[in-house]
Amino acid sequence: MTAQRESDEAAIRRQIDKIGEGLRDRDLDGLERLYTADVVSFDVEPPLQHVGTAAKLKNWANVFTFFEKVRYEIRELKLTVGGEVAFGHGFGRLGGTLKNGTETSGMWVRATFCFRKIDGIWLIAHDQVSVPFDITSGKGVADLEP
């Protein structure tokens, strides 16, 4: 791997880490700086897609209506980095302390991130979160772990 690719991969990993920091700190402005203006997000919440930073931030703001304290974790993140675009996939989990005081570890989901390098900064242009489902019941399977 070239020094530039190593530097870019490290920068992308820092951006992913900033998601957790922004959620922990309830910092929507900080979260906004991680995304392209035209980000398209396929999140677990309806509708099928959320387009633009305002829509993405609305999803993150919804997290704060349920959680007093938020933890966000990514595991097994694998990245492929090009000159101006990159993608990665891994497993994510959102948990913490709910507003009623209940601790929850959350559930593991599959996460995909697509980045564009704009003015030297890696920004999330697309993300997708999904939950596996049992085809016979049509219900999500939320107890799997990486």
Image (cartoon, rainbow, N blue to C red):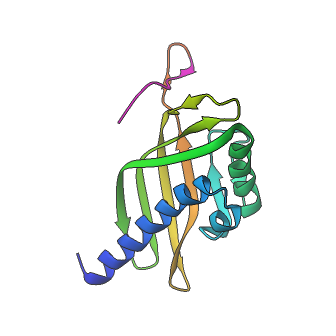
Please report the bounds of the magenta region as a residue range: 138-146
Main SS of the magenta segment?
loop
Left or right relative to 53: residue 93: left
Depth check: give the residue in front, 14 or 144: 14
Q: Position of residue 26 (x, y in %)?
A: 66, 56
Q: Position of residue 11 (x, y in %)?
A: 42, 73
Can you tell which quarter of the image residue 95 is in?
A: top right
* Residue drawn 52% across the image and 63% down it: 18
Q: Is residue 139 magenta?
A: yes
Q: Position of residue 65 (x, y in %)?
A: 75, 41
* Residue drawn 56% across the image and 86% down it: 119
Q: Is residue 133 magenta?
A: no
Q: Is residue 84 above or below residue 138?
A: below
Q: Is residue 144 above or below residue 80?
A: above
Can you tell which quarter of the image residue 53 is in?
A: bottom right
Outermost residue, top side: 137
* Residue drawn 48% across the image and 52% down it: 112
Depth check: give the residue in front, 103 or 92: 103
Can you tell which quarter of the image residue 96 is in?
A: top right
Outermost residue, front side: 101
Depth check: give the residue in front, 34 or 101: 101
* Image quadrant where one finds the C terminus: top left
Q: Position of residue 30 (x, y in %)?
A: 64, 67
* Residue drawn 55% across the image and 31% down it: 104
